[in-house]
Image (spheres, rainbow, N blue to C red):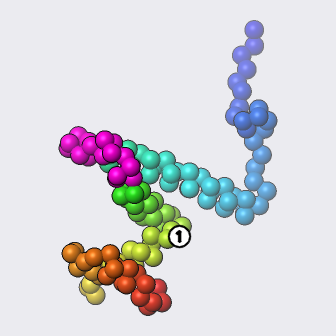
Amino acid sequence: MINVVLFPGNKNGGKITPPKSLEEVASNIHVQQLSDIENLIEFIHDNILLTLSVNNIKLENDKILYAKDVGLLSEALRSLIRKYYGIDHPYQYLSEKIFRISSDQSTIYCNYEPNSNYIDIVKLLSHNDNI
């Protein structure tokens, strides 16, 4: 009997072919980055919910009530990680509008008061300052 080592192939059992161009390499890297980001978001999301649950904040008891807040948090994490990879996300614009950094870059400030209502925040976000 002969031992044969099979080398990796594609899912169809065929040979793996090298990319044909730099654009294809860049596209493959981008697709992999997006996949990695989604996997990381899922991991972080699950751990946040677990940590909240361990601390007796059981959001799963009323998923509909908290779904939008959890979605907001997930998108903020997605924005942060995409920014790290140099990939745009709409929340990056929101963070630029909502927060400012001191001139010496030692402090971050919120551009609205903690007790502001949603109308104040909408006005802040709609202010056009060429961001």
Q: Residue at x 56, y 51 (%)?
A: 35
Q: Quadrant of the N terminus?
A: top right
Q: Position of residue 2 (x, y in %)?
A: 75, 13
Residue 130 is left or right of residue 112, and the answer is right
Q: Residue at x 39, y 52 (%)?
A: 67
Out of 8 and 32, give the one closest to the viewer: 32
Q: Residues within 10 Å of mark 1 (few under 14, many from 20)?
A: some
Out of 94 and 88, give the one closest to the viewer: 94
Point out the residue furthest to the top here.
Answer: 1
Q: Residue at x 45, y 70 (%)?
A: 91
When the figure is inspected, residue 98 is found, relative to residue 39, above or below; the finding is below
Point out the residue furthest to the bottom here.
Answer: 129
In reply to whether residue 80 is colored magenta, the answer given is no
Q: Would residue 51 be visible to someone looking at this image?
A: no
In reply to whether residue 60 is colored magenta, the answer given is yes
Residue matched to label 1: 88
Q: Which residues are magenta?
A: 52-67
Out of 9 and 42, give the one closest to the viewer: 42
Report which quarter residue 126 is drawn in: bottom left
Q: Position of residue 87 (x, y in %)?
A: 54, 67
